[in-house]
Image (cartoon, rainbow, N blue to C red):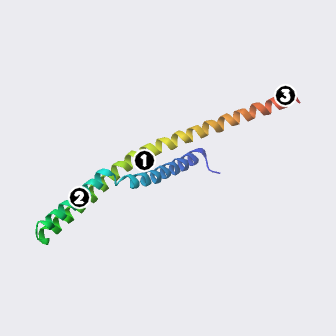
Amino acid sequence: MPNETEVSKQASQETEQLAAQRAKTRARNARWDLDVAVFLFAVMIIVIILLFQGIGIEIVAPVAVFGLVMVWLVGWRRGRQLYQFFYKEELSKLEHDLGETIEETIEETIEEKVQKALRERWK
């Protein structure tokens, strides 16, 4: 039979894993925000302008690749920042919910004991 420390360690690990999963999902969804989309649109406009000006593909291709790499780096960096923020938020939310659940369980247990004692007293 597992002792209390093993149970609390397992609950803590499950809480951290759930928080990490939720944070990763939220960060993945929020990574490509409006700023990144505008930057990508600006890169596309620059490439189109360069092509219409008759600039050779030898210059336009590296500009386009550099722009795409920058968009990816900005999105990746933003995703990491958001993940850290969301992870802390989800972890604190789950710990709060777990604390409330434990308090409710304790209250129910105390209430059950009081009711049992009252029933025995009335018999």
| Residue density around tag 1, few if under 14, some if 14–19, many if 20 or more, within 10 Å | many
Closer to us: mark 1 or mark 2?
Answer: 2
Residue at mark 1 to residue at mark 2: CA–CA distance: 25 Å
Which disc, if any, is residue 70?
Answer: 2
Q: Nearer the viewer, residue 99 or 43?
A: 43
Q: Which of 30 and 112 is in front in this view?
A: 30
Q: Position of residue 62 (x, y in %)?
A: 16, 67
| Residue density around tag 2, few if under 14, some if 14–19, many if 20 or more, within 10 Å | some
Q: Identify the element where label 1 is drawn.
A: helix
Look at mark 1 in the image and give the residue it sits on: 87
Q: Identify the element where label 2 is drawn.
A: helix
Three-letter amino acid code at the position of disc 2: Met
Three-letter amino acid code at the position of disc 1: Tyr
**Residue pictured at 25% horizontal, 55% vertical:** 39
Q: Position of residue 98 (x, y in %)?
A: 56, 42
Look at mark 3 in the image and give the residue it sits on: 121
| Residue density around tag 3, few if under 14, some if 14–19, many if 20 or more, within 10 Å | few
In the image, residue 109 above or below residue 29 = above
